[in-house]
């Protein structure tokens, strides 16, 4: 099919196309996703090929988009909704956490809500306010939701197809600063949606990242190699559930762990990962699990976002701190 | 107006109602009524309704049984068997009228007070009590009777109903949906968004607002400056205000609205003008915010005595009928009492059931941890 080098954006577009082709119940909904193809063009050309009743331009109303998607799912459809930007998902927050996440349990399993909520998220593109937020912890904290974030074109394609095929609601976080990164997209989903992936093998410390930060960690690992340190990079891929078995195995081998994400460190994914790894690998750890992430501050104006976002140096600095124990 | 609403519908959407009507006065010129409070049958040109004596008796039986069920639940709450109850007292006609207007393929999306609608959809009343007793958060299969789970977050279900109705349009069937909500809910963004989506996509959904005059302690005037049914015209679909204590008018207007919707004409807003005779819920004290005189004035419009007066006046039911309704009511009361008292507490591992449709490692781990922990107590090994 689309073997060869694809951008993440194109890989996602192909995933949506395949999902629409494979299942007539799959629908896309969102603001500007029709003729425009979405502000990031992820749905480019899909309305032309599948029609306005399958690729639906919606009113500008996020709660409305998610709330009606729930109704469509109750009627047997499989809606994939696009939230235009991370910062605009909050008006739909109630529908996501109070309705979408809970209805399956409330109905004792009698209804399924296979709704995928696609959100271009996180920063690094020099955007204005509300266009760079990392809200994964809110969603991962909510039982009933699955939360995933791909870091490369292959995963973007297959994880989106797997998310759409899942009978659970999935929050699908797209690292928007990586949309244009190209990579090989193979023919097969070689990992289940919720398995972590060793992005680079190493022996001295484990860097744990997902979405946009995987590349930063791979760069850091390459740089560290020049200093004679061998860093393993684990790409979490899924934030709920977390593949703790993979993390545990890696950390037990390396004895050190550093979690890297863009979201503020306080009460973020890193807090959870550090706590669990401490519980499970206490006697294997040479140093406390360290975290590198955003500050407890609103996402800053783009001229200073570089200071907010973890970069190679901040990751390497944390590695040094880990080795100093 | 961009939707395919008829001239007739348009006429109803813009009636001549003065803006300065007192709240809760009941002095509403545009109130559709087919049965006066004295039980006299009146005709309305736009909402004709023919009923057989048997149908009238059936409606009466519904009203009485629904009220009985509700009263039983209120007592069970007082006896500590239920944690909370949201009574429908006074709103029986709005619920039974609209509920009986539905066809089997239609779908209802309730709030937390639609016990009468549930009754009409043939949902076992005991199912409704599970969440008020605290043994589940819903618990029934919504697709079995096309009656969705109760929704506590005000207004959220209006969007679910609308999305479901959009699905019906896609499927090309002639089913329709009713979304129930209160006058307070009309202030919620989700309800406005539902109006927008339903109107834009011409969704076959009837928005059935039971204006019972109060949202806990807040009067309708705290929610709106115009009569609620007139909201619809701003969204481009018809709105109708019906006497919510008149089961026949509720039946006729809702049937019309559902048919309007299922025929591809898009949504309708029905405002059932009614009154909550009891407290908001069993934890509310209405004497703190409303006058006894107001409640008394509404008592004179009681939906059950009104239909009873009609049956008596027209000689449509005899003593034997009323005795049989009474007997059924006793039977229901007993069944509800016994059913609730014997409702078992769920196994605590229910917490982990159905969180996801597919396996989730965190849930699986926590279930295993909890089960091991519980089993470490004496007598806990059965978990
Ligand atoms: C979003 C939200 N806010 C507040 C509440 C608390 N609450 C429960 S019922 C209620 C009043 C609702 O009034 P109305 O919509 O008129 O319906 P009624 O109960 O009168 O039938 C409120 C404020 C809630 N359940 N949901």
Image (cartoon, coloured by chain):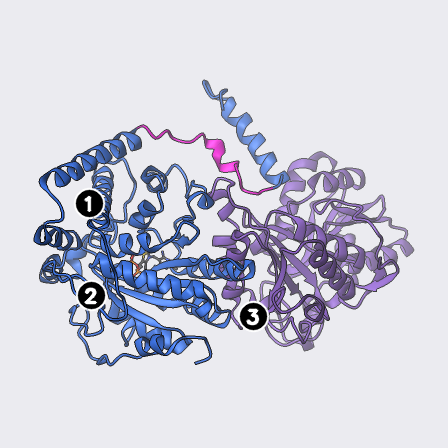
Chain colours: A purple, B blue
Q: Quadrant of residue A248?
A: top right
The relative height of residue A104 versus residue B274 in the rendered view (above or below) is above
| Residue B113 image offset from top left, x and y in percent | 31, 51
What's the mark number on residue B27? none
In the foreground, A191 or B34: B34
Disc 1: which residue: B64
Q: Which residues are magenta?
A: B342-357
Disc 3 is placed on an element classified as loop
| Mark 2 or 3, closer to the camera | 2
| Residue A249 image offset from top left, x and y in percent | 76, 38
Q: Chain of mark 1?
A: B
Q: CA distance from mark 1 to mark 2?
A: 21 Å
Disc 3: which residue: A58
Q: Chain of mark 3?
A: A
The relative height of residue A105 versus residue B335 in the rendered view (above or below) is below
| Residue B267 image offset from top left, x and y in percent | 42, 67
Disc 2: which residue: B33
């Amino acid at each position: 099919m689309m073997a060869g080098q694809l951008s993440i954006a194109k890989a996602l577009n192909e995933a949506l196309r395949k999902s629409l082709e494979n299942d007539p119940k799959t629908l896309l909904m969102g603001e500007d996703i029709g003729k425009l193809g979405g502000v990031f063009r992820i749905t480019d050309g899909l309305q032309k090929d599948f029609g306005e009743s399958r690729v639906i331009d919606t009113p500008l109303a996020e709660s409305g988009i998610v709330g009606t998607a729930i109704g469509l799912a109750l009627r047997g459809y499989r809606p994939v909704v696009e939230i235009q930007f991370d910062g605009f998902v909050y008006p739909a927050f109630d529908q996501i956490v109070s309705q979408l996440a809970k209805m399956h349990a409330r109905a004792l399993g009698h209804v399924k809500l296979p709704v995928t909520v696609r959100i271009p998220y996180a920063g690094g593109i020099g955007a204005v306010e509300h266009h760079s937020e990392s809200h994964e912890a809110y969603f991962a904290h909510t039982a009933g939701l699955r939360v995933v974030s791909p870091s490369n074109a292959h995963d973007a394609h297959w994880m989106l197809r797997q998310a759409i095929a899942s009978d659970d609601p999935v929050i699908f976080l797209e690292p928007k600063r990586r949309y244009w990164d190209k990579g090989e997209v193979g023919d097969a989903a070689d990992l289940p949606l919720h398995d972590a992936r060793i992005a680079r093998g190493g022996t001295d410390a484990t860097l744990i990242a997902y979405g946009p930060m995987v590349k930063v960690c791979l760069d850091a690992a390459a740089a560290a190699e020049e200093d004679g340190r061998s860093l393993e990079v684990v790409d979490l891929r899924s934030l709920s559930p977390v593949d703790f078995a993979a993390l545990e195995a890696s950390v037990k081998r390396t004895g050190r762990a550093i979690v890297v994400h863009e979201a503020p460190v306080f009460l973020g994914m890193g807090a959870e990962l550090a706590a669990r790894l401490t519980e499970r690998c206490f006697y294997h750890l040479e140093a406390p699990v360290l975290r590198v992430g955003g500050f407890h501050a609103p996402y800053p104006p783009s001229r200073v976002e570089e200071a907010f976002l973890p970069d190679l140096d901040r990751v390497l600095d944390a590695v040094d701190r880990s080795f100093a124990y | 107006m961009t939707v395919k609403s008829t001239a007739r519908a348009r006429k109803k959407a813009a009636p001549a109602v003065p803006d300065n009507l007192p709240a809760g006065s009941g002095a509403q010129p545009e109130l559709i009524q087919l049965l006066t409070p004295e039980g006299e049958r009146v005709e309305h040109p736009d909402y004709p309704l023919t009923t057989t004596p048997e149908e009238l008796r059936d409606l009466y039986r519904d009203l009485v049984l629904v009220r009985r069920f509700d009263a039983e639940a209120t007592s069970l709450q007082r006896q500590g068997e239920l944690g909370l109850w949201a009574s429908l007292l006074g709103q029986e006609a709005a619920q039974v009228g609209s509920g009986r207007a539905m066809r089997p393929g239609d779908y209802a999306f309730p709030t937390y007070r639609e016990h009468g609608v549930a009754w009409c959809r043939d949902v076992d009343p005991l199912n409704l009590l599970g969440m008020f007793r605290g043994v589940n958060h819903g618990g029934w299969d919504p697709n079995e009777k096309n009656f969705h789970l109760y929704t506590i977050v005000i207004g959220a279900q209006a969007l679910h109903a609308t999305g479901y109705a959009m699905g019906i349009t896609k499927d090309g069937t002639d089913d329709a949906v009713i979304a129930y909500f209160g006058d307070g809910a009309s202030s919620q963004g989700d309800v406005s968004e539902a109006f927008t989506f339903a109107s834009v996509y011409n969704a076959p959904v009837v928005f059935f607002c039971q204006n019972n005059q109060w949202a806990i302690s807040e009067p309708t005037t705290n929610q709106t400056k115009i009569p609620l049914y007139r909201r619809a015209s701003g969204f481009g679909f018809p709105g109708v205000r019906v006497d919510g204590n008149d089961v026949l008018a509720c039946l006729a207007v809702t049937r019309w609205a559902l048919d309007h919707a299922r025929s591809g004409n898009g949504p309708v807003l029905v405002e059932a003008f009614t009154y909550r005779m009891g407290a908001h819920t069993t934890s509310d004290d209405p004497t703190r915010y409303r006058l006894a005189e107001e409640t008394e004035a509404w008592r004179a419009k009681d939906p059950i005595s009104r239909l009873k007066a009609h049956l008596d006046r027209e000689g449509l039911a005899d003593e034997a009928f009323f005795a049989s309704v009474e007997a059924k009511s006793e039977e229901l009361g007993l069944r509800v009492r016994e059913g609730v008292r014997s409702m078992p507490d769920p196994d605590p591992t229910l917490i982990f059931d159905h969180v996801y449709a597919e396996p989730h490692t965190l849930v699986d781990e926590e279930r295993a941890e909890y089960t091991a922990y519980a089993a470490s107590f004496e007598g806990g090994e059965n978990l």
